[in-house]
Image (cartoon, rainbow, N blue to C red):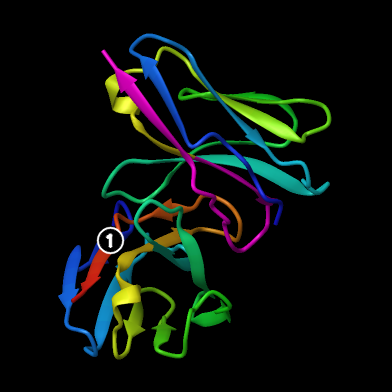
């Protein structure tokens, strides 16, 4: 596609519910990143894929967060047993090569009630 | 990654030139300086990147002094649509993660 597509745009989850957030990167982009952005803050790195390999997951806040990219294209960020502190915008970015030309999606706004 | 410091907010008027300065005293030799723009409900968008001296594109200019401990993003003749948060990032060009600060909220008025 022309840009990075994320779905859903908005998600309301009850505390304790599992959620799955989808990212469709730009076709052919090797690198894919997930970021978390709390209200009034800059985005914070969660995890990074190169093709299907998850090379860095140092930013995932807990073992309730899990990301995958099984075929090296679409990626899913899964949050298990959501908590109120998980409420944030989750941004996906892709780039054709490491370190250059990042394109961000518009994000998924997750609200945990 | 080098920590950056930039003003929390700035106000300007349409048609004015806006300069946003970012301090990065601990910048490393192989670090680049990159600026992103973010509108509400959108992801950050790349504006400009540089290593030293001056870089100019169709959107902005980036001025980097010889010691590279700071940089200035210059937006010529801003309009209302330039109201956004601007982030200064410092990191190796081949780095695999971007480190954002809290950014500078620019508000442009008539």
From this view, report whether residue B102 is shown above or below residue A4: above
Residue A14 image offset from top left, x and y in percent: 17, 83
Residue B25 image offset from top left, x and y in percent: 77, 41
Q: Residue at x 67, y 30 (%)?
A: B71
Q: Residue at x 33, y 83 (%)?
A: A78
According to the picture, the residue beneath numbered tag 1 turns out to be: A5
In the image, taking residue B65 as reference, residue B85 lies left or right, namely left
Q: Residue at x 39, y 17 (%)?
A: B12
- Residue A4 seen in the current view: yes
Pick the quarter of the image with the C terminus of chain B. top left
Q: Residue at x 44, y 77 (%)?
A: A72
From this view, report whether residue B106 is shown above or below residue A71: above
* Count of marks overlaid on the render: 1
Residue A56 image offset from top left, x and y in percent: 59, 77
Q: Magenta span has B101?
A: yes
How crowded pointer 1 is (Cα within 10 Å; few <14, some 14-19, many 20+) is rated as: many
Pick the quarter of the image with the N terminus of chain B. bottom right
- Residue A31 seen in the current view: no
The quadrant holding residue B45 is top left
Chain containing the residue with disc 1: A
Q: Magenta span has B1?
A: no
**Residue situated in front as seen by the camera: B48 or A2:** B48
- Magenta segment boundaries in residue numbering: B87-110
The quadrant holding residue A11 is bottom left
From this view, report whether residue A63 is shown above or below residue B77: below
In the image, taking residue A17 as reference, residue B19 lies left or right, namely right
Residue B24 image offset from top left, x and y in percent: 71, 41
SS label for mark 1: strand
From this view, report whether residue A32 is shown above or below residue B74: below
């Amino acid at each position: 596609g022309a840009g990075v597509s994320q779905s859903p745009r908005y998600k309301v989850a009850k505390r304790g519910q599992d959620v799955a957030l989808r990212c469709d990167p730009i076709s052919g982009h090797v690198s894919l990143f997930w970021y978390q952005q709390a209200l009034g803050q800059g985005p914070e790195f969660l995890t990074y894929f190169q093709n299907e390999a998850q090379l860095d997951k140092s930013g995932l806040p807990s073992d309730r967060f899990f990301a995958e990219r099984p075929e090296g294209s679409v990626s899913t960020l899964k949050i298990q047993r959501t908590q109120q502190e998980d409420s944030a915008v989750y941004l996906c970015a892709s780039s054709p090569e490491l370190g250059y030309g990042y394109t961000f999606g518009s994000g998924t706004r997750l609200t945990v009630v | 990654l080098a920590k950056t410091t930039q003003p929390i907010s700035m106000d300007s008027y349409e048609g004015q030139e806006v300069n946003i300065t970012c301090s990065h005293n601990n910048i490393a030799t192989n670090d680049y300086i990159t600026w992103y723009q973010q509108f509400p409900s959108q992801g950050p968008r790349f504006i400009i990147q540089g290593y030293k001296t001056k870089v100019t594109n169709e959107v902005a200019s980036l001025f980097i002094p010889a010691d590279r401990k700071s940089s200035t993003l210059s937006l010529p003749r801003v309009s209302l649509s330039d109201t956004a948060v601007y982030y200064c990032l410092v990191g190796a060009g081949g780095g695999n993660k971007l480190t954002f600060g809290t950014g500078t909220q620019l508000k442009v008025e008539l």
